Amino acid sequence: MLLWGGGWSALKLLTPHVSMEVLVFWRFFLMSLSFLPILYYLKAPLVLNKTSLSFILSSAVLNIAFMIFSYLGVKHGLASAAGVIITTLSPIMTFLLLALLFRKKSPNIQYFGLFIGVVGGVIMLELSSFELFMSGANIYFLLCAIIWAGVTLLAQYSNAHLHPIHYSFFISAIATILSFFYGYGKGLLDVFDQNISFWIALLYLAILGQSVATTIFFLASGKLGSQITSSFMFLVPIFALLIAYLFLDEALESHVLIGGSLSLLALYFINKKTLKSG
């Protein structure tokens, strides 16, 4: 959770130096390379079929879109706001998508949590002022939350066909190929003109904040169970706020703190039945 929370500050440090196309490619390229020793450690054969390929291609496209909007949001907004808004709204959006698209019925306590989450989202995104919302970074954060909800659903249904680590590797590998063509001719080699601080942030974002953190999460899920492990997600926005405050000197915005607190409360109610059974 600490590694994930720090990813937003790392992204903020990178955005002034290279273009979006360059950063998207190198993030996925380095992430793919970092998965190789993890795959060797697992010693499980890579298996790919038509069903899993459809999940992977869809997730790769969504991951690229998520990275694009994250870049734009953090470039024009605060890393702390991104860490709180996206992290808290994504699971709420996931619950909403399940309810609307699949007509999944849930206990009333979870719908109460959804209501609180919507209120928290309105406060965080400053939706009371449409002009302010459209002119700022919050619209990108909202798009990220919606996209990640789709990624979450795809990941959930892909578990029956592919190991989660293999799934993450294939996504990053295909996203690398797609983002290469997306960024070709737009200065992909510009990263070699950057200083050591840039490379530390880039390696953190691609390796520690992605491959290593994801692997730890999946290993913990196997030992603790997915319900208990998922409950630790509540720590991500807290770490995102603290790291942005310490390393970027970002002020803690009141609407983000209030809305984020309501959204965390909403996640508690949405996951209340799951956490209790875990």
Image (tube, rainbow, N blue to C red):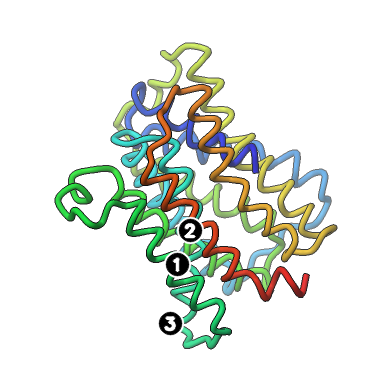
Disc 2: which residue: 263
Name the spot of residue 25 as percent of width and height, x first.
44, 38
Outermost residue toward the left in this view:
131
Instruction: First in sequence, mark 1 or 3: give its number.
Output: 3
Q: Is residue 10 above or below residue 126?
A: above
Give the residue type that dot 2 points to: Ser
User: Which residue is located at x 57 percent, y 72 percent?
Assistant: 50
**Mark 3 in CB contact with mark 2 (< 8 angstroms):** no
* Alpha carbon separation for disc pair 2 and 1: 7 Å
* Alpha carbon separation for disc pair 3 and 2: 22 Å
Q: Is residue 261 left or right of residue 239?
A: left
Residue 200 position by quadrant? top right
Instruction: First in sequence, mark 2 or 1: give its number.
Output: 1
Q: Quadrant of the C terminus?
A: bottom right
User: Which residue is located at x 32 percent, y 33 percent?
Assistant: 75
Q: Which numbered marker is on residue 101?
A: 3
Q: Is residue 153 left or right of residue 12?
A: right
Q: Is residue 265 above or below residue 79?
A: below
Name the spot of residue 258 as percent of width and height, x first.
43, 49
**Mark 2 in CB contact with mark 1 (< 8 angstroms):** yes
Q: Quadrant of the N terminus?
A: top right
Q: Nearer the viewer, mark 3 or mark 2?
A: 2
Q: Which numbered marker is on residue 116?
A: 1
User: Which residue is located at x 37 percent, y 35 percent?
Assistant: 78
Give the residue type that dot 3 points to: Leu
Give the residue type that dot 1 points to: Ile
Between 170 and 234, the one lying in front of the other is: 234
